[in-house]
Image: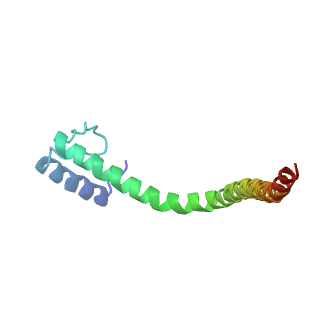
Amino acid sequence: MIEPNPLVARVDALLASHRHADDDVPVLTESVEPREPEIEAERLEALAAGFERAVLGRLLVELDPALEQRLAPKLATLFEQTLRGLREELASSVRELVRAAVVDAVQRELALRRKPEDAAGEERV
């Protein structure tokens, strides 16, 4: 026959004394349905808005450097291309303006030189 272990008997007695005193405390073998917390709608919305602000704030702090790092080279290239196009367009406009100014100046000078000859030719007739 197996002799009972005195330590096991003492543990059983201790558990039995606590079991009778606290019956509404669940043990690991019992399943317990959790109660849903009752939160007011206004408090829930305020909580959600605070969470949204916190997430957006943190996201923007991390997003700005990432965007700067990725967009800076592309923006520099686009800026250079735009400047090159504007420079070419401006140079073309300036050339056209200078050409028109020279043509006008030459025509005025020719007109001034023809008038005395025309006037002299008319006097001879």
Q: Residue at x 16, y 41 (%)?
A: 40
Give the x, y percent position of residue 69.
61, 62
Give the x, y percent position of residue 1.
37, 47
Above or below: residue 58 compared with residue 19: below
- Residue at the extreme left: 21
Q: Residue at x 25, y 39 (%)?
A: 34
Q: Is residue 39 visible?
A: no
Q: Quadrant of residue 119?
A: bottom right
Return the residue nearer the eye: 55 or 21: 55
Return the residue nearer the eye: 113 or 93: 113
93 sits left or right of 116 in the view? left
Render colour scheme: rainbow
Return the residue nearer the eye: 37 or 50: 50
Q: Quadrant of residue 9?
A: bottom left
Give the x, y percent position of residue 118.
84, 52
Q: Residue at x 25, y 49 (%)?
A: 47
Q: Residue at x 30, y 60 (%)?
A: 7
64 sits left or right of 115 in the view? left
Above or below: residue 57 compared with residue 40: below
Give the x, y percent position of residue 120.
85, 56
